[in-house]
Amino acid sequence: MAKSPASFTCTECGAAHRKWAGRCDACGAWNSIVEETPLGSGPPARRTGAKGRTIALTALSDDAPPPPRTCSGLGEFDRVLGGGLVPGSAILVGGDPGIGKSTLLLQAAARLAGAGLDCLYISGEEASAQIRMRAQRLGLDGAAVRLGAETSLRDILTTFEAERPDLVVIDSIQTIWADHVDSAPGSVAQMRAAAHELVGFAKRRGTAVILVGHVTKEGQIAGPRVVEHMVDCVLYFEGERGHQFRILRSVKNRFGPADEIGVFEMTGSGLAEVTNPSALFLSERDAPAPGSVVFAGIEGTRPVLTEIQALVAPSPLGMPRRTVVGLDSGRLSTILAVLEARCAIPFAGLDVFLNVAGGMRVNEPAADLAVAAALLSAREDVAVPPDTVVFGEISLSGALRPVVQMENRLKEAEKLGFSQAIAPARGGAGATSALTVREMEDLTGFVGEVFGAG
Ligand SMILES: Nc1ncnc2c1ncn2[C@@H]1O[C@H](COP(=O)(O)OP(=O)(O)OP(=O)(O)O)[C@@H](O)[C@H]1O
Ligand SMILES: [Mg+2]
Ligand SMILES: [Zn+2]
């Protein structure tokens, strides 16, 4: 006998639970588990004896060329999609409230309409008049995008079937309400049902569907992660409050590389593309100072230089602080442990603050050496030469591992006027950039050579 279906769901990660708990053990979120009425009652019927329909099978090779992608002309947006919009694709764009999702998608829809697509923009959050006001502010009031303000999934789908547009934007998926699902708007069940129907429509009719999803910390409405697996492409729009930079990051893409980023700047007249993010991130840089190190990173297919800043100060607390913005805090702990164990440089009794300038987030292990350099530079109060970029992965033994796309990193640094790089030894591969590369075997050698300590 099958167990009764789970009736509690985490609104953050979508994990099913058989009873309520204060904390989801799948993702660790607090207060995110809500009760849900299961869709059908009882286990799915096994239609024993009933014959299925034979499905049509096709060959892997198909003579018909794939339908062309459409470029919006908003280069940062097109790149994140993997080179333009694929017909019939389902795209989820998640982001914090107020970060600029509606602005971005209205601008993208206007551009795509200009490129010849029939675009519909359906808002469940704002009245058409409000969207028109935004369009006016963005200078897009002449664009051929048609607006709708609606939350009923049934009405939206009926409209789509009648109109057969090329692109629809749904802002936001959390406001869409399916009347066949007995659960509140914004719940996991509603969101799944709406996403399922809309993605189905995209595949059936070849219409590209963009779903906007709010990221929430409160757990009152379901986070977009619960529909991530249903769509072809998952993009997150990120940024720090108080910074004008916005980063569109692909975390999943069935039609292109994941981890690609597009960089924008929020201005009074909308989002402006930032085609040279390195220059932008480094433009915030003050005079060379202890604790500041430039990391030559790779974001998606493109090199991006960012500044890593550290502050190390004696701690009044028994348990010193470890505060990290823009990097993984686990990675910081590992690097501190390696510095202590392999180089005998203790950080006990010291508060450590680590930050990536400009609201950027760095996920690459190649940032290890730059982080270590920033920490040491702050601790020893010695500035790393300002014309230097640093990158390399640190292993637990203290050895430095080579990183991917070394030449691209060096070329970008050269382009931005840097003259030397501190990097792992690359085992004889020839250099093509004019940068002086100081190759390091391990962390101890690095500490000795750069800081004269160890
Ligand atoms: N008049 C204005 N001048 C300049 N910037 C503005 C103006 N109005 C709004 N903005 C910017 O646009 C941002 C809001 O953009 P938008 O409405 O696209 O965000 P959103 O992510 O869709 O928000 P929501 O969660 O409300 O749907 C604001 O945070 C602000 O920075
Ligand atoms: Mg919005
Ligand atoms: Zn969870």
Image (cartoon, helix red, strand yellow):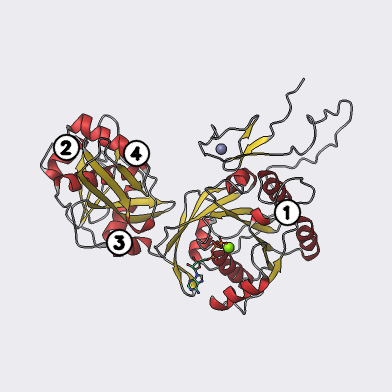
Q: How far is disc 2 from disc 3 in space, using C-alphas? A: 28 Å
Residue at which label 4 appears: 331
Q: CA distance from mark 4 to mark 1?
A: 41 Å
Looking at marks 4 and 1 on the same chain, the residue that comes earlier in the sequence is marked by 1
Q: Is mark 4 within 8 Å of ligand 3?
A: no
Q: Which residue position holds label 3?
A: 282
Total marks in image: 4
Nearer-the-camera pick, 22 or 68: 22
The amino acid marked with disc number 3 is Leu
- Vertical placement of residue 20 versus 362, above or below: above
At 82% from the left and 28% from the top, the residue drawn is: 46
Q: What label sits on residue 423 in the rendered view?
A: none
Q: Quadrant of residue 400?
A: top left
Earlier in the chain: of badge 2 and badge 3, it is 3
Q: What separation in Å lies between label 3 and label 1 (alpha carbons)?
A: 45 Å
Q: Is residue 258 visible?
A: yes
